Image (cartoon, grey):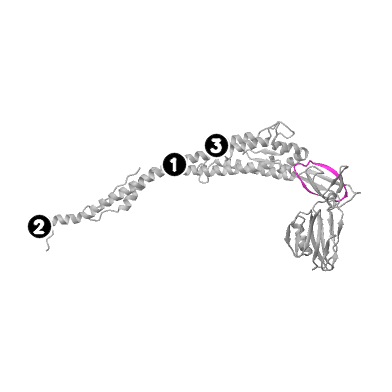
Amino acid sequence: MGSVGISFGSPTSGQGFDVSTTVSQIVANLQAVETPWQNQLTTLQSEDTALTGMGTDLSSLSTALSSLNSFDGAFGVMEGSSSDNSVVALTNATSAAVAGSHTMVVSQLAQTYSYASGNLGASDTLSGSLTIGGQTITISDGTATDSNGNTIPQNNTLSTLASYINDGDYGVQANVSTDASGSELTLLSDTSGAAGAVTIDSSQLEDSTTGDLVTITQAQEGQDAEFSVDGVSMNSTSNTVSTAIPGVTMQLLSAAPTETVQVEITNDNTDVESAVSTFVSAYNTVVGDINTQEGDTSSGTAEPLYGNPSMALLQEQLQEALTFTQTSGAITSLAQLGITVNNDGTLSLDTTTLDSALSSNFQDAMNFFQNSSSYTSFGANLTTTLSNLGNSGPDGLIYLALEQDSSQESGLNANISSENSSISTQQSQLTTELNEANYTLEEIPTELQSVNELYSAITGYDENPEG
């Protein structure tokens, strides 16, 4: 620690000295004890930045891996095609679907029961009652009343009747269409297929404007779709079919009883290859982080985590997980999927080898990444490793390293805060004491003058005679 000297100048000059500058020099000298603590804090904060970045990249690697070991991830995506999309169009294939070829014949499409009134004048009003599925709607005096006694104010037109029906639970959806010939009420069953018939009784419904009865008759008969899959006859109340082929949803678009439609369900190699490529890239980012910390910064100083034991453990456990050999299936190592390790620890991907492996052993490739109750897969083992290495508490390697740094930083900050408090007290005392000393110095010439005047009065001697 350096020393600070105080220059008082000539004691009889009356000029004193600069108290503020002197106190600042003394305080700066006292604060020098904090320099090692500040330097250690800076080092720890640099470690925190590097550790946090590595934790983020490990999290990204975990996310990339989850796309491969999740049952609804890349391996769960299937592709489907139809030889005639005008007859059968595939709309979705889930992970429950199994690759294979199927034949289909669509002999009949599903239809929904519908009912329609005759044309009425666009402004005609109604009276009487309409019964739908056993529920009666009574219309009179501008009021609609159902069979349960509920009344809702209405102006008694086709449009308000349709609105009232749609607001209730009558088993049909109502609509009014208007053209040059007038307005027509249509009712469409809520239930498609042959089971969707609805009883409609309009015998008591009258067009008040003309005095004619309003007749509502069946416009279309409901029917189930009829088709076969691989020679097995099936039917469906809807033209959207999701149970004929497991995991596959299809739309029946037209009946073609004499045409055989070929439906192909295939594995989606493209999605898997993209997910594997993302995994390799994410892994290489983590290895790049580790390799960076093993060298120097651009200024020639060691990287923040150089020699840090956490980095050695991280590297060791990643390498062990990467060389894990699975004990079941035709795919037991990364090399069989075209993934090899470079000299610097990063990975390379041969997409040709990967595509070939997926085409010949798709299920085993999926089992290599996904969990199994009978053996430990590569994907499950690596998932556990990444969980133990990441920034998630309470046991993640990065998490524990950050916690340790945080504890040290708290101690250092406490030391600095305590020292600053002590220095602040000393600064206040020094300022007071030196201001008093400075005042004394500034008063010395006045005191000397008083002594001279007293001396002259006693002795009659004048040290400063006027001449």
Expressed as whole percent of the image width and height from the top left, the position of residue 340 reads 68, 38
Q: Nearer the viewer, residue 432 or 9?
A: 432
On the question of residue 285 being in view, the answer is no
Crowd tier of the residue under label 3, counting other residues whose Cα lies within 10 Å: few below 14, some 14–19, many 20 or above: some
Q: Which residue is mark 1?
A: 412
The quarter holding residue 318 reads: top right
Q: Nearer the viewer, residue 453 or 226?
A: 226
Crowd tier of the residue under label 2, counting other residues whose Cα lies within 10 Å: few below 14, some 14–19, many 20 or above: few
| 431 horizontally vs 257: left or right | left
| 150 horizontally vs 431: left or right | right
Secondary structure beneath dot 3 equals helix
Q: Amino acid at mark 1?
A: Leu
In whole angstroms, how far apart are the C-alphas of marks 1 and 2? 67 Å
Q: Which comes sooner in the sequence, label 1 or label 2?
A: 1
The quarter holding residue 271 reads: top right
The quarter holding residue 229 reads: top right
User: What range of the chain is rendered magenta?
Assistant: 90-109
Q: Which residue is mark 3?
A: 310
Expressed as whole percent of the image width and height from the top left, the position of residue 151 reads 73, 59
Residue drawn 60% across and 34% down?
317
| 116 horizontally vs 371: left or right | right
Q: Quadrant of the N terminus?
A: top left
Q: Which residue is mark 2?
A: 457
**Does the magenta run of residues contain 95?**
yes
Q: Amino acid at mark 2?
A: Ala
Q: Amino acid at mark 3?
A: Ser
Secondary structure beneath dot 1 equals helix
On the question of residue 348 being in view, the answer is yes
Count of number-bearing discs: 3
| 427 horizontally vs 247: left or right | left
